[in-house]
Amino acid sequence: MRPPLPAYHGRWRFITIAVLVPLLLAWFAFWLNTEFRAADRMAVQINISSDRASDAGTLIAHVSDAEASQRGFVLTGNASFLAPYAPARRKAEAALARLNGRFADSPEQQARYRTLSDATRRKFTEMDQVMAQRRAIGLESSIERIEKGEGRRLMETIRTQADAMLGAEASTRKARVSAFGRHARFLHTVIWTAVILISALLAIGLLLIWRQRQSQRHAQAAAYDAAQRNRAILDSTIDALIILNPSGTIESINPAAERMLGYRAAELERRDLEVVLLLPSARGTFHQRIGLVDGVLADPFLPDQEMLHHDGSKVAVDIALGVMRVPGGDHIIVSLRDISARRRAEALKDEFISTVSHELRTPLTSVVGALGLLRGGQAGMLPPPATRLIEIAENNSRRLIRLINDMLDIDRLQSGRLRIEKAGIDLRGVAQLACEGSEGLASSAAVHIVCNLPEYPVMVMGDKDRLLQVVTNLVSNAIRATPSHGTIAISCALEQGDSKAIITVDDDGPGVPPDFRDRIFGRFERANVQDGIGTGLGLAISQEIVQRHDGRIWFEDRTPVGTRFAFSLDILRLEPAPIDGAVPILICEDDPDMANVLREMVTTIGYAAHCVGTAAQAREALATGHYAVLLLDLNLPDENGLNLAYSLHNKAGSPAVPIIIVSVLSREGIPQPIPFDIVDWINKPIDPQQLSRAIALALWPSTPPCPTVLHLDDDRDVLEVTAAALSGSAIVLKATDLKTARELVQRKTPDVVILDLHLEQGSGLDLLPMLIDQRGRAIPTILYSAHDIGPEAAAMVDAVLIKSRGSMPDIQATIRRVLHRHDKESI
Amino acid sequence: MSRIEILYVDDDDDIRTIVELSLGMDPDIRLEAFASALPALERLKNWSPDAVLLDVMMPDMDGPTLLALFRQQSADTDTPVIFMTAKGRDADISYYRALGAVGVILKPFDPLHLAREIRTILNRAR
């Protein structure tokens, strides 16, 4: 999972405020609009009330004016008094008309209005009649009517109603004005509260924005600071650094990388890494090619790699890869350490050690040799004191030799260069060699060595020389620990249900001192420093060798006296392991154990094995024509092996399969001459090397007797060594560049081609298109490179060998294999 | 025990003497020793020994070069060659074997068992 972005905690506050403030403002505006409308309505109602009061007052005034006009006319009979009457009446009626329908909100006022309206009409009617009587009859009649009081009562009614109406309107107006005032104060309060609230929210928002900007500024400053620090580190570090984006493109390089690779940064940026480094795998995405899964690198350290310099040369480096997990994808940091100086120093040290050991060993050879010959009586019998002195000198010379050998081994151990080259071996052979090799030392110490070896093979995967070194060391220690005339027993056996092979070395010595037991396998540890014998490195080296074989080494007390040193290794698993393209070999052996041993030996040296137990099964298997060699036991349950071999060779219509006899019987023990060719006769117990040579010999006839091998490599030393290795078994054409190789191919078609992948100019694979023989078939090709080969390149050739892992015998065997396969395919 | 004829080249007089004495203890070994490569090559033109025993580091011509010249001048490429050397690193031994040596005897050797060691190597090479 990619890492999340850094958390930002103020987000929800911002969102809340950003949503809340507009909502609040919108609601407030709506509410305010509603409240203002209500206030408007209240103001209108107040105005209406005022108008009604005004109209009522106007009505009274106009009625009074009309009454005064009527009264003047009645009293004087002067018509001029009637001038205001008609306008007053119109205005009074107009006031009544305005008041009409304006009291819908108040039934009391409406009732007053109706009374007032009725009284006003009747008043004007009364006044009209009074004035009509005045005109028609005269003053007395009018006064008489007036004295009846109708006009006065109507006038009082009008006044009473109008006053009541005015009072009611005044009360209403007062109440409404009061309500309006309260409402206005409420609005005032609300508006100020809202202003304060919104101002507060805005202030908070602005504060948050300010704080965020402050944080951003601090983050930018911190980022700038970190970038400056990182840049300073990158610029000043002595190791070259390359930063790659997820697609493998170079994003940046530091000055050390510029110096190492000879490029300026701008020349490499945005270019593919393969400009300067060939990745081990050429398939998949960049991350797949470097083994990056879920941010974890399968192999973050790539030692002993080569970078390509701008000038075409190669720079030896150790590479450390790091993963930078950023939101843009997993970036890779490639850290390069120039190991050229280290390599030169190692080479110098190796050469120094080699030279020093050589220079020490050469005179020691003479010293030890001379002393040994004296001890052996070559110069005649010596008197006992002289013999003793010779022994002392020889023992100390040998001690010096051991010291040199152990120092060399400990150097290899410390540098991790102790090479263990495993192969399927019979531990009995190791024990036997140790017995034989220790006899000289044992005899000089007057110690008897017994070698207990089983009849059955004890097969393990191991380095024969190194395991022999272990056994020899244990025996050497045992000889030193064993008193004169004591016995040392070297034994080899299978243990733990035949799952472990074990070698034991038993002595009659005094045993390991208790205070030494815990550190017996330590470096430079000696049980008895005073005796001056040994370097204290032998058991440490032995333990390292055994552990490198995934084995265990230990010691235990023996009864009644003595110590047993032992080591155990996993027994070689005998399951057949078919090798793709390997030459098939048929094993006809009725003893299952021996068949398994043979199968293991055959598969170990690179062939495919199939076992049958009877002659009939062998005939059936060989009838398929699948097998290239027959390993034949003679004592078969259904038929004598020689009869089977004879019948196979005399079978018409089919080429005879090469036969190797593997038997407990010796060839000399067969009474009559064998009337057919066999490749070899191997006696049991089987010597794996003899078996290997015999199979190789059996396969050679099917390939060119002396194949022509074209070897293309820009390293002349490699060419010379390979040619020397193939000397006598192949004609080797050597080319150091593609042009020479092409000319050689045109001049003579090779049977096999060995190519180096990386040449100074181009790749050995560039030669492939013209590697066609006269029959139009591809010439068998072996890729022989110091680099790991990618699957695509491997698919283009018949075999791949790695220089650092392979050896010359590998090349011979590989040539045999590819030629055999080629021949078989062409049939 | 079969008789073995060995050509031996070593520039170190002391070691050569010791090898001569050591192998002289075996009556079935006939040794011809040379102090440098060129006389040995001359001898090999008209003699085909059962084995060639070569020191590696010699001043005028080293053992590997002698071996290469011997293979070139001789039609017989089967004569087993054994190197004797004080340079016994893994890489050195691998190199000698790659050159075609059937065995490598490390100096210092045990003079009392040198003959047996040579016989063992030759038997395995056969």
Image: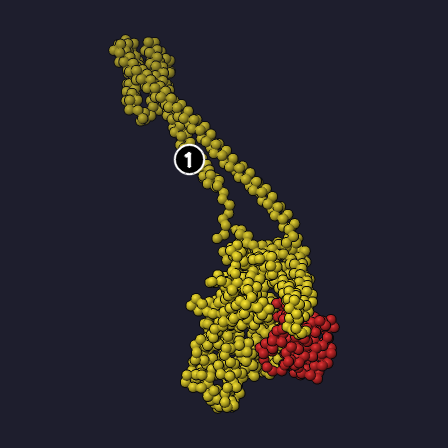
Q: Position of residue B61 (x, y in %)?
A: 72, 73
Q: Is residue A593 visible?
A: yes
Nearest the viewer among A464 and A695 is A464
Please give left or right for residue B80 compared with residue A198 in the image.
Answer: right
Please give left or right for residue A704 compared with residue A48 in the image.
Answer: right
The residue positioned 34% from the left and 16% from the top of the image is A60
Nearest the viewer among A799 and A285 is A799
Q: Position of residue A148 (x, y in %)?
A: 25, 11
The residue positioned 69% from the left and 71% from the top of the image is B15
| Quadrant of residue A309 within the rendered picture | bottom right
Please determine whether, in this image, residue A275 is positioned above or below residue B18: above
| Quadrant of residue A471 within the rendered picture | bottom right
Q: Position of residue A772 (x, y in %)?
A: 60, 79
Please determine whether, in this image, residue A72 is positioned above or below residue A91: above
Q: Where is residue A149 in the image (x, y as percent from the top left)?
A: 26, 11
The residue positioned 47% from the left and 73% from the top of the image is A454
Q: Chain A is drawn in which colour?
A: yellow
Please give the letter of the chain rendered in red.
B
Please give left or right for residue A492 compared with residue A803 in the image.
Answer: left
Nearest the viewer among A555 and A441 is A441
What residue occupies the far left of the structure in this picture?
A148
| Label 1 crowd (10 A; few <14 / some 14-19 / many >=20) | few
At numbered mark 1, what does the secondary structure look like: helix, strand or loop? Answer: helix
Please determine whether, in this image, residue A800 is positioned above or below residue A644: above
The residue positioned 60% from the left and 68% from the top of the image is A444
Q: Is residue A806 visible?
A: no
Q: Mark 1 points at which residue?
A: A27
Residue under mark 1: which chain is it in? A
Tell me which amino acid carries mark 1.
Trp
Nearest the viewer among A424 and A647 is A424
